[in-house]
Amino acid sequence: MTYGDGIDKTVPELKSRMEDLENGDYVKLRGGSEDEEEGSRGESSGCSIGSVTSVWFWVKLIFLVACVGVLAFVIIKWIGPFLIEKELIPFIKWVRSTFSIPMLGLLLFASVALFPTILLPSSPSMWMAGLTFGYGKGFLLILSAASIGVTLPFLIGHLFLHKMQEWLKQYPKKAAILRAAGEGTWFHQFQAVTLIRVSPFPYMIYNYCALATGVHYGPYILGSLVGMVPEIFVSIYTGIMLRTLAVASDVRHSLSAVEIVVNVLGFCVTASATIVCTIYAKKKLSAMQSEEAETP
């Protein structure tokens, strides 16, 4: 073997190509294979697409937060005071003059506990609990009442078990998400129920359908209470903000710029956190549904 043959085998291929163009000639040196060049181009294009997607996500998120902030400012500055002066303040005065604090607490507890059973929203009662009792007592009142509110439909579901199972068969896509909560280990059921509560799925319908999916009561009640915590805090915050606006309107004291900014920021943070939790829960449920579909 000659010295020239060794060089040909050990040195990478180096092509020299002379191309004639109208403006002149040039020499193009290219080392390596075309597959490596295409692979590097694909990696660079993939990175650029990923970076563009990430930037676009943050742009949409910032735009959403800005829109929510502007909407909150308009409501607090103009729409809110008008409705508060004409509707909310007279209602609060009537409630306080008619019911004592213990009686009002009992009524709010009963409404939060019983309204989901008859398919009525309990959010106004949660707002009133936040307005009257604040974060601490309001949270305990709502959480204890909600435990009854999700238990009663679960127990009543025994009477309509076969009808619920037939109803779920008519909507296989929606039922697949619910059935994911009735499979797997105790922790898997707890996680799935929690995500369903946080997600935009109608919780009053799930209260009656839960038993038909095979979920046990333990993970059902704990997952329901944990998943309702964001909604409870949003409702309490809404009630406290309404009370602040009602007091300011009743004494004819307009909110200062600092108070408006604080309320708007608080509203934006609360709304953004709720949206992020909802999106996260929806993605996790979709992932769990895909995993269940792939499992033989």
Image (spheres, rainbow, N blue to C red):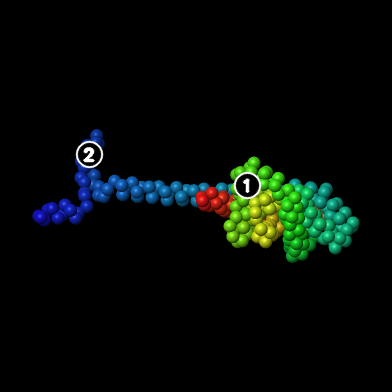
Secondary element under disc 2, as helix, strand or loop, is strand
Secondary element under disc 1, as helix, strand or loop, is helix
Q: Which numbered marker is on residue 175? A: 1
Q: Is residue 113 left or right of residue 100?
A: left
Residue furthest to the left: 2
* Residue 64 against residue 194 in the figure, above or below: above
Q: CA distance from mark 1 to mark 2?
A: 65 Å
Residue furthest to the bottom: 136
The structure residue drawn at horizontal position 62% and vertical position 54%, both measured from the top left corner, is: 182
Q: Quadrant of residue 126?
A: bottom right
How many marks can you see?
2
Q: Is residue 110 visible?
A: yes
* Residue 29 against residue 128 in the figure, above or below: above
Closest to the observer, 22 or 290: 290
Closest to the observer, 45 or 171: 171
Residue furthest to the right: 98
Q: Amino acid at mark 1?
A: Ala
Q: Is residue 239 visible?
A: no
* Residue 184 against residue 34 in the figure, above or below: below
Q: Quadrant of residue 197?
A: bottom right
The first of marks 1 and 2 along the sequence is 2
Q: Residue 3: where, in percent of width, then height?
A: 11, 56
Q: Amino acid at mark 2?
A: Glu
Label 2 packing within 10 angstroms: few (<14), some (14-19), many (20+): few
Which quarter of the image is occupied by the N terminus? bottom left
Q: Which residue is mark 2?
A: 19
The structure residue drawn at horizontal position 47% and vertical position 48%, both measured from the top left corner, is: 52
Q: Residue 287: where, in percent of width, then height?
A: 54, 52
Q: Residue 200: where, in percent of width, then height?
A: 65, 49
| Residues marked 1 and 2 touching at CB (< 8 Å) | no
